[in-house]
Image (cartoon, rainbow, N blue to C red):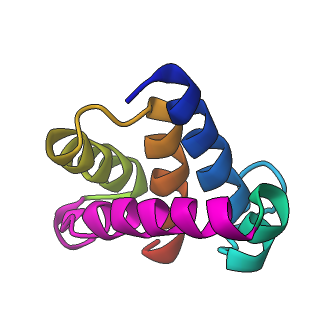
Amino acid sequence: MNEELNAELVAAVRCWCGWGTSAMPHRDDSRLIERFGRQRGAELLREIVALEDDFYISDARLVAANVPDMARRCADDFKRKRPGVAGDIVDAFVWCYTFDYK
């Protein structure tokens, strides 16, 4: 993935899940559409949902000893499945996952 598209996807994931603007994850499709426009927002949303689906396949919530262990495990699982994804995207999904399963 080229740097420009990767940067756009990072911004889209952060916007969608509320990273940096919310105390807890708050996924909001309309916020994404408002920021990126209807067509591009819909394209980005499809990519984000696919990434999130792959991220949430992790069983870290079932096997981790604690929240930091869960964070490491789910990140590692995702990085094996999607090695080219930006670390900022991984961090945003770790935030969501650990909040959802704490």
**Quarter holding the N terminus?**
top left
Relative to 13, residue 96 above or below: below
Q: Residue 62 at x, y = what percent? A: 20, 73
Q: Looking at the image, which residue sits at the far top?
A: 3
Which picture quadrant has residue 55? Answer: bottom left
Q: How many marks?
A: 0
Q: Is residue 28 visible?
A: no
Relative to 102, residue 35 above or below: above
Q: Looking at the image, which residue sits at the far front?
A: 39
Q: Residue at x 78, y 48 (%)?
A: 20
Q: Which residues are magenta?
A: 38-64
Q: Residue at x 47, y 55 (%)?
A: 93
Q: Residue 9 at x, y = what percent? A: 56, 44
Q: Residue at x 28, y 53 (%)?
A: 74
Q: Residue at x 84, y 67 (%)?
A: 34
From the image, give the main secondary structure of the stretch colored magenta: helix
Which picture quadrant has residue 53? Answer: bottom left
Q: Does the magenta portion include 63? A: yes
